[in-house]
Amino acid sequence: MKRILSLLFTFVAAAAFGQLPKPAETFGFEPGADYKMATYDQMLTYYAKLDAASDRVQMIDIGKSVRGRPMKLIFISSKENMKSLDKWKDISAKLSRANIPADEARKLSREGKAIVWFDGGMHASEKAHAQMTPELVYRIASEESDEMKNIRNNVITLVVPVINPDGLDIVGSWYRKYVGTPYETSDPPILYQEYVGHDNNRDWFMSNMPETKAVTTVLYSQWYPQIVHNHHQTAPSWARIFIPPFRSPVNPKIHPGVTTGVNLVGTAMANRFAMRKMPGAISQTTFEMWWNGGMRTAPYYHNQIGILTETSHATPTPRYYPTDSVPKTVGGKTTDGTEIFYAYPWRGGESHFRDAVNYMLEASMAVLDLAAEKRDELLYNIYQMGRDAIDDKTGAFAYIIPKNQWDAASGDNLVNVMMQGGIEVHRATAAFKVGNTEYPEGSYILYGAQAFRPYLADLMERQNYPDLYQFPGGPPIPPYDLTGWTLPMQMGVKVDRVTTSFTATAQKLETKIAVNAGSVKGNAGYGYAIARQDNASAKAVNRLLKAGEKLVVATASFTDGGTNFPAGTFLVEKGSKTSNNLSRVVQETGVSAQAISAKPANIKAMPKVKVGIYKSWVDNIDEGWTRWVLEQFDFDIDTLHDTDIQAKNLSLYSAILLPSQRGEEIMHGHRKGEMPDQFTGGIGLTGVQALERYAANGGTLICLDQSSGFAIEQFGLPVEDLTAGLSTNEFFIPGSLIRMTVDVNNPLAFGMQPEAAASFQRSRSFRKIVPTRKGEGGNEKTVPYPSPDVVEVARYASKDLVMSGWAKGHDRFLKDKSAMLNVGYGKGRVVLFGFRPQFRGQTHGTYKLLFNSIYSGAMK
């Protein structure tokens, strides 16, 4: 009788949930259909229907994209579990934070539910994962297999179906427009995230973008999942999917329980594919576990198992792989079935969009099945790893950020970055001492004894990347991304690492730090002074200029009322509206102003600033980051496309900025036939001549990193790029922080500290070319002048060059070489950066070099 009732219940349940809306009923086609992509609006409609129809599904908003599209988080579990979501969230938080006794943790681990995270749609040009997530959600909610019941009973599944809604809009509309044309498989000529494009997966410790903030809040302050599965495309050619394990190296700050957990999940995936006769799963190639800052890598430092899969076939357009053309190796693995990590090779044939969806679904099911079977183990393990971090006696006792910083807001900015990542921060409510060092009230204390110590230590301390070569004496194995990223170095913040215990009266911060309102001190006779060393001074200056205030810059130091003011100080001349405008601006920006009684002798007018940023039709991530950084500081910006450079009146701009981009792309862009005609070509010779005239007539052209080589070549500048043409055997710095000394008396370096970290991403160094002429006997003789004026603003240091990361050949090609030059060109100048002063919105410590270069263009 019990057997009959059980079967009857199963039948009724299956019938009821068989009525749940299917994705195809809303889209008009199955997810993964050839030549088809569902829109984000269709997906939102579908998810709303599913939410309304099922008590196993709940959808909430977690934020908005850059363009204002809603970001959705969907919960799926059993009906009973869904009634107690807050309970499961609270258990997960307690276990992850690990501030409870072991016996309570054991009890909660047995009682709680595994929390598993999936996301799709991050890299919008990888089109399949956003199309897959509707079916994943539907299957978890509707299927009545024993496996799925077990999953629903033991797992709370969190899905952000499209983590980059704007990208789906952009890429989807492009594909639908050009399907059936020669451009069917091309990608849009713009970034698929408004500012950062592909770098939306490089923003996971800074959280500059709203999409990143929305997600990290859920991951590290609310739900604390034990497994985070980040779907991507594509696998190495001829493989079907990349799955863990990853290749070496692994960052030693990651708990080995995370590393082995990643391997465990990867093995479960490989076994599932093998038993379902789905060949082509490959591991231990390309991707590693060193870098912090990706969607699946930042979780490692929070004791979470971060999973990356890279599935082949990223387009709805089918493709055929000839079965008689299987390569001998794929991703460095042989294809004869003898490789442990490519033991079941794919042999080619037809490849469809739906294949990608199927592989992603099965990979996701492997994660869910493992989580359901090892629910209590996963929960207790994240607790144990957190306790290990708290109890670690070998790491720092604390990191102290003194209240008094070179840039007053920089400490606050660093604290906010750390808090967004779930780090606990205390603020001293009274002065305290550590040894002989005194710290004032208001200093920040980040104690090492917290569950996320790996994240805290990794961002605060230098990275030492290992030496890895393809073979002895051969070229280096390039890292997947960066080798060094230490935040205090990048942001120009003084942080003291303390290893001895101390006591301090301090209060834990519950919310991030808001801008502390600045003040206006004194009664002005002539006007007001604003210090240049604060990055926020640029925002204040730009807002005052837009408000119609008259500003000048002190070109030499001066004294007023017994106070010394350095060269470069911004001065606001007193006018009828200045008091109100200045009061508002200092409140908004946190910058303070000091009244000045008399007009200094040496000043130069600061007109309104207008910046033109070149934007190629070859989508350029550095352009987006540059635009974003300047917008944060209220610079007046125009985007300049190829035709604008060629034909527009460029004299309207205080400065024109060429973001880092290969000269070939700037000059020629997309070739004919690669893209629709309106998106082909670069600035060409006409554009080069226009930029030459602009600079020669008094304009300022600012070139970042790669574009410096373009300017040197096209303008014939008397500068040599010392890294051009070098092999990786000779010189290789794939992403490190390099020590740089700065000439703080140079107007382009006003407000800078004398030493800074240059973010060096396969970047460059310069040398001034000294003109020579034939002397008597045919010997070359140095010609002192006439030649263009070349002034060094910053140079790479003479010792201890590598601050964080790894480098090869740096002593030969960087030591004592120029990092930034101001090159005279006619009546104007070309500013050459050998590095990226605004890299990924992380390098706050070098922002002023970029800002000053722009201001110098206005002060002609």
Image (cartoon, helix red, strand yellow):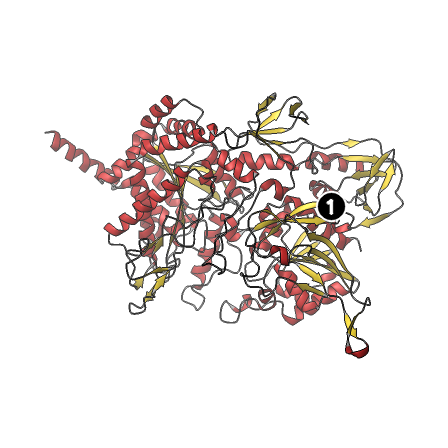
* Residue 198 placement, left or right of 74: right
Look at label 1 and name its amino acid.
Lys
Expressed as whole percent of the image width and height from the top left, the position of residue 612 reads 67, 57
Image position of 31 (left or right of 744): left
Quadrant, the N terminus: top left
Quadrant assignment, res 383: top left
Q: Quadrant of the C terminus?
A: bottom right
568, above or below 666, in the image? above
Q: Position of residue 346 (x, y in %)?
A: 29, 60
- Rendered image quadrant of residue 563: top right
The residue that appears at 76% across and 39% down in the rendered structure is 531
Q: Residue furthest left?
A: 1
Can the viewer see residue 21?
no
Regarding mark 1 in the picture, which secondary structure is present there?
helix
User: Percent x, y for residue 170?
Assistant: 48, 55
Of 37 and 572, the residue lying toward us: 572
Pointer 1 residue: 546
Closer to us: 732 or 31: 732
Vertical position of residue 353 compared to residue 538: above or below: below
Give the farthest residue toward the bottom.
Answer: 777
Residue 59: quarter of image: top left
* Category of crowding for the residue at label 1, using alpha-carbon neighbours closer than 10 angstroms: few (below 14), some (14–19), many (at least 20): some
Whether residue 126 is visible to the viewer of this picture, yes or no, is yes
Label total for image:
1
Q: Is residue 158 left or right of residue 821?
A: left
Residue 783 location in percent, x, y?
Answer: 80, 69
